[in-house]
Image (tube, coloured by chain):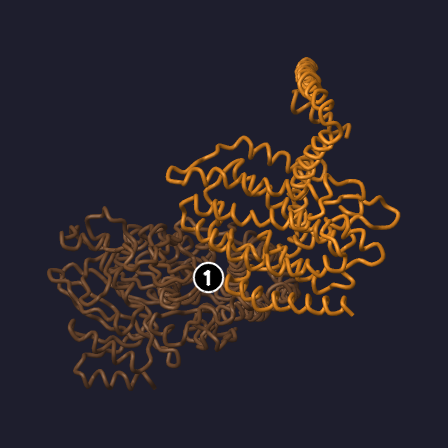
């Protein structure tokens, strides 16, 4: 660490104490401005709102900040983790230059993406083209609200949490189609069309795999579902449903082997071919957030959520979630891509009937 | 034998047949055919099961001479049909109804020499851009006549039907590996027609050869196919040795064989990686490149280059073996043998990979024959044809490689053939490194100016049969040099099998053909 600081000092400041001092003064000034801003604007506003609505607003505010923190922190970590995982699976070591173990690589990357020029092709359908990155990103934030990270660490426990999450995650398909159609590019369009049929095909088995869980726990609240697994995780009683859910989840997030909407060797980059800079990275961010959400839901529905011995619940929750994410990455770096008709056949001819049968058996056994 | 039967039949038609000197010319028989009877002759060849190797043209100033090279899988002897054309009225019946593979060769001759092929469905230019105003390979500057100029841009992209659309795959596309451009007519995700546009990498290699001496042109041979350059170099030096009647030292021949086989393995490994990349699997790529890197290191020690080795010389090699090369090859063989398990685990048994490639892009025997497909593409379609066996060059007669054949003809078969060929190449290497004879590694004296004459030489590159046809007029520069590139014919066969495929299957088929664009653009 000391060595690293010394090297930074030598390389970034040329070993000149004056330049270092100037930089420090500049940093202090920025900090002062930020603190003043927080105190004056946010502090006063909070005070005013506090007297009007009380705790709810604080909770909302903290929730928003927390969700954003989780979303961005998760994306930064996953980008790094994916490159490391890929590297080690491919007999190389992945990023290693920026920061210890290359941990700051994703920060450097996001700085680069922020600095990039945002190009808007002349012939695009402007409203659709501009809205698509937002439409794909915002539902991710909403879905985060109902996820119970720990027994008491949840922004809002809604009694129809499952429905809310499923409803909002369906919006991804809409956004991808907006991007594909709005780009006025044949490759993007094919990607968008693929995305719709894939989204519909895999949402049904996903839903059908969740229903047995809901039936067994008797609630639609995510926290309730976790609490129902106090004695036994649902994966032990519903292994088939877990598999179906997990496969559909990989397909829903457009990850290899189901990454047909953005199949590189066929469609160049699919629906986001025409996007650049921060607009592109919003798609990227949404992909990683979605990966986190589906894995977190798998944890909640099947792996007992935050339940676990010794360690605090939130640690268990993240451990389980990131383990599932690791498996998704593992898929990506070992499998080729399936073909489009095989993908649809797999869902309609295998997963959906299987999920139906599973549902019937569960229902029958519960009635007995 | 098939050839004698055919020649008897052709004699019955009243054609003049002359025996050629294979040791000096590279083909067995010359068949002189009047211009208007070429279709008839082609039909006779087709009937006997011949495949088309090459069509080329030589400008003799007072006449243009067209040469059609035919060969047979079971009776591999090259027959050359010659047609004389008057440059004032360069019109010849097209044989692309009989051999569709000749269609592209005819287009090439049309744009380079101005020979018009009657009955050709689409004589649009293949390589050249549409501002060119003369025929580049004619010895005199001949302007393109006005009525031919429309052929420069004769492609019609207007959608003929309601819901069909055109899509441009390339020249910048992740899965065309370079600058191949395919114009696809799509109906949803299904391809109705594919029209390749070549020439984005065209360097007019054949004209370059005519303005350089033989020694100056030689390094260019490594720039044609940058993945398997030695097969092209061997083709060139082999042709020159055949033309001059040189006896290459035994040591040089064995070392050539070793480097050629190493190069073949490196090329197949690169193909393996990129093919899997086309199918969406990234990891095998790194394993394949790791193995390929070992070969490149060995070759770098020997030749000084990692990609475009200019290692062969007319009459031998550039340099003798360096210390430790043979031990390095032995180490590589040991290492590589253990690696097949990884590829089998990661790729061969992978259910998604099998589903993506099995029964995809089936090239039937007949299609391969009419289009002149060669190499692993042909052997995947159940034909045991390998130039290393049928016309042994270098030291292949001492170390004959086993020919790998699969009957299915699909992309999976082509994958298995190539993987198996790596193993067979390792076997050849194992024998060869044990038996490198002592002696000189090149001839002391080689002629600067070959005797006048013509020569054909064929080698087996990792992609298929490479052929070279050189006409020497006794000066130090070739009068005419023509390459037969394997990817060119294999891609022509692709346009036939791609019809009705899904775009994802087209990518899988294209990847399985192992195309190298600079080689077919020349």
Q: Where is A143 relative to B257, above or below? A: above
Chain letter, brown in picture:
B
Quadrant of the rendering where the C terminus of chain B is positioned = bottom left
Counting from the top left corner in percent of width and height, residue B317 is at: 47, 58
Residue B108 can be seen, yes or no: yes
Residue at the spot x=47%, y=56% of the render? Answer: B227
Question: What crowding class fits label 1: few (fewer than 14 Cα within 10 Å), some (14-19), or many (20 or more)?
Answer: many
Which residue lies under the disc numbered 1? B514
Question: Helix, strand or loop at disc 1?
Answer: loop
Please identify the residue farthest to the left as the structure is shown: B88
Residue at the spot x=47%, y=73% of the render? Answer: B380
For residue B60, side relative to residue A264 (left or right): left
Q: Where is B465 relative to A157, above or below? A: below
Quadrant of the rendering where the N terminus of chain B is positioned = bottom left
For residue A44, side relative to residue B449 (left or right): right
Q: Where is A7 relative to B451, above or below? A: above
| Chain A colour as displayed | orange
- Comparing A290 with A276, the one in front is A290
Residue at the spot x=68%, y=68% of the render? Answer: A360
Counting from the top left corner in percent of width and height, residue B441 is at: 49, 61
Q: Chain of mark 1?
A: B
Counting from the top left corner in percent of width and height, residue A156 is at: 72, 40
């Amino acid at each position: 660490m000391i060595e690293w600081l010394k090297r930074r000092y030598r390389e970034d400041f040329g070993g000149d104490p004056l330049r270092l001092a100037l930089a420090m003064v500049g940093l202090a000034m920025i900090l002062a401005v930020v603190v003043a801003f927080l105190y004056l604007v946010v502090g006063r506003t909070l005070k005013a709102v506090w007297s009007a609505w009380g705790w709810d607003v604080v909770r909302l505010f903290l929730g928003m900040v927390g969700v954003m923190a989780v979303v961005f922190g998760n994306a930064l970590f996953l980008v790094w983790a994916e490159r490391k995982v890929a590297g080690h699976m491919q007999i190389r070591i992945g990023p290693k230059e920026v920061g210890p173990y290359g941990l700051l690589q994703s920060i450097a990357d996001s700085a680069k993406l922020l600095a990039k020029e945002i190009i808007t092709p002349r012939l695009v359908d402007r409203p659709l083209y501009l809205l698509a990155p937002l439409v794909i990103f915002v539902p991710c934030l909403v879905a985060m609200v109902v996820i119970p990270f720990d027994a008491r660490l949840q922004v809002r426990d809604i009694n129809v949490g499952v429905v809310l999450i499923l409803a909002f995650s369906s919006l991804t398909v809409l956004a991808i189609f907006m991007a594909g159609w709005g780009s006025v590019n044949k490759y993007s369009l094919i990607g968008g069309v693929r995305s719709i049929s894939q989204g519909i095909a895999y949402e049904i088995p996903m839903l059908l795999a969740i229903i047995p869980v809901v039936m067994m726990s008797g609630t639609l609240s995510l926290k309730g579902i976790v609490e129902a697994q106090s004695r036994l995780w649902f994966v032990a009683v519903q292994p088939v449903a877990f598999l179906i859910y997990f496969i559909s989840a990989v397909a829903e997030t457009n990850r290899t082997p189901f990454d047909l909407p953005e199949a590189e060797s066929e469609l160049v980059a699919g629906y986001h071919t025409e996007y650049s800079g921060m607009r592109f990275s919003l798609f990227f961010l949404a992909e990683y957030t979605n990966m986190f959400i589906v894995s977190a839901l798998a944890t909640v529905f099947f792996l007992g959520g935050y339940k676990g011995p010794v360690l605090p619940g939130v640690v268990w929750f993240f451990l389980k979630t990131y383990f599932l994410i690791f498996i998704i990455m593992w898929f990506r770096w070992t499998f080729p891509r399936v073909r489009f008709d095989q993908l649809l056949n797999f869902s309609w001819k295998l997963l959906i009937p299987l999920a139906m049968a599973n549902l019937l058996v569960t229902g029958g056994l519960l009635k007995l | 034998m098939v050839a004698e039967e055919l020649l008897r039949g052709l004699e019955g038609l009243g054609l003049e047949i002359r025996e050629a000197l294979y040791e000096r010319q590279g083909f067995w028989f010359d068949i002189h055919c009047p211009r208007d009877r070429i279709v008839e002759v082609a039909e006779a060849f087709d009937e006997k099961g011949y495949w088309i190797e090459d069509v080329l043209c030589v400008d003799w100033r007072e006449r243009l001479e067209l040469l059609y090279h035919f060969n047979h899988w079971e009776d591999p002897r090259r027959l050359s049909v010659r047609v004389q054309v008057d440059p004032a009225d360069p019109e010849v019946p097209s044989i692309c109804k009989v051999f569709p593979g000749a269609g592209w060769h005819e287009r090439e001759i049309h744009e380079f020499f101005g020979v018009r092929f009657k009955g050709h469905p689409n004589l649009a230019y293949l390589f050249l851009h549409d501002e060119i105003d003369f025929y580049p390979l004619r010895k005199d500057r001949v302007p393109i006549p006005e009525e031919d100029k429309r052929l420069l841009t004769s492609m019609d992209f207007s959608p003929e039907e309601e819901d069909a659309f055109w899509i441009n795959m390339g020249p910048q596309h992740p899965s065309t590996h370079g600058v191949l451009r395919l114009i696809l007519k799509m109906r949803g995700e299904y391809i109705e027609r594919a029209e390749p546009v070549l020439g984005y990498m065209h360097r007019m290699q054949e004209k370059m050869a005519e303005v350089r001496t033989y020694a100056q042109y030689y390094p260019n041979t490594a720039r044609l196919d940058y993945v398997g350059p030695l097969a092209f170099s061997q083709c060139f030096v082999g042709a020159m040795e055949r033309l001059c009647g040189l006896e290459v030292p035994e040591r040089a021949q064995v070392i050539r064989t070793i480097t050629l086989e190493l190069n073949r393995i490196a090329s197949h490994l690169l193909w393996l990686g990129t093919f899997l990349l086309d199918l969406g699997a990234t990891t095998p790529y790194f394993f394949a490149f790791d193995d390929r890197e070992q070969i490149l290191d060995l070759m770098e020690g020997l030749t000084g280059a990692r990609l475009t080795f200019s290692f062969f010389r007319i009459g031998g090699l550039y340099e003798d073996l360096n210390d430790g090369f043979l031990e390095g090859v032995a180490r590589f063989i040991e290492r590589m043998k253990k690696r097949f398990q990884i590829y089998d685990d990661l790729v061969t048994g992978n259910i998604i990979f099998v589903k993506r490639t099995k029964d995809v892009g089936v090239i039937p025997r007949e299609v391969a024959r009419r289009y002149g497909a060669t190499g692993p593409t042909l052997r995947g379609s159940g034909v045991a044809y390998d130039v290393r066996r049928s016309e042994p060059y270098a030291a292949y007669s001492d170390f004959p490689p086993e020919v790998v054949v699969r009957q299915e003809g699909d992309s999976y078969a082509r994958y298995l053939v190539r993987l198996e060929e790596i193993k067979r190449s390792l076997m050849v290497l194992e024998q060869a490194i044990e038996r490198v004879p002592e002696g000189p590694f090149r001839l002391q004296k080689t002629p600067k100016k070959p005797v006048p004459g013509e020569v054909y030489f064929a080698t087996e590159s990792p992609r298929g049969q490479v052929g070279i046809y050189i006409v020497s007029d006794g000066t130090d520069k070739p009068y005419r040099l023509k390459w037969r590139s394997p990817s060119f014919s294999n891609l022509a066969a692709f346009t036939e099998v791609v019809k009705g495929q899904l775009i994802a299957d087209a990518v899988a088929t294209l990847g399985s053909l192992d195309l190298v664009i600079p080689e077919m653009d020349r």
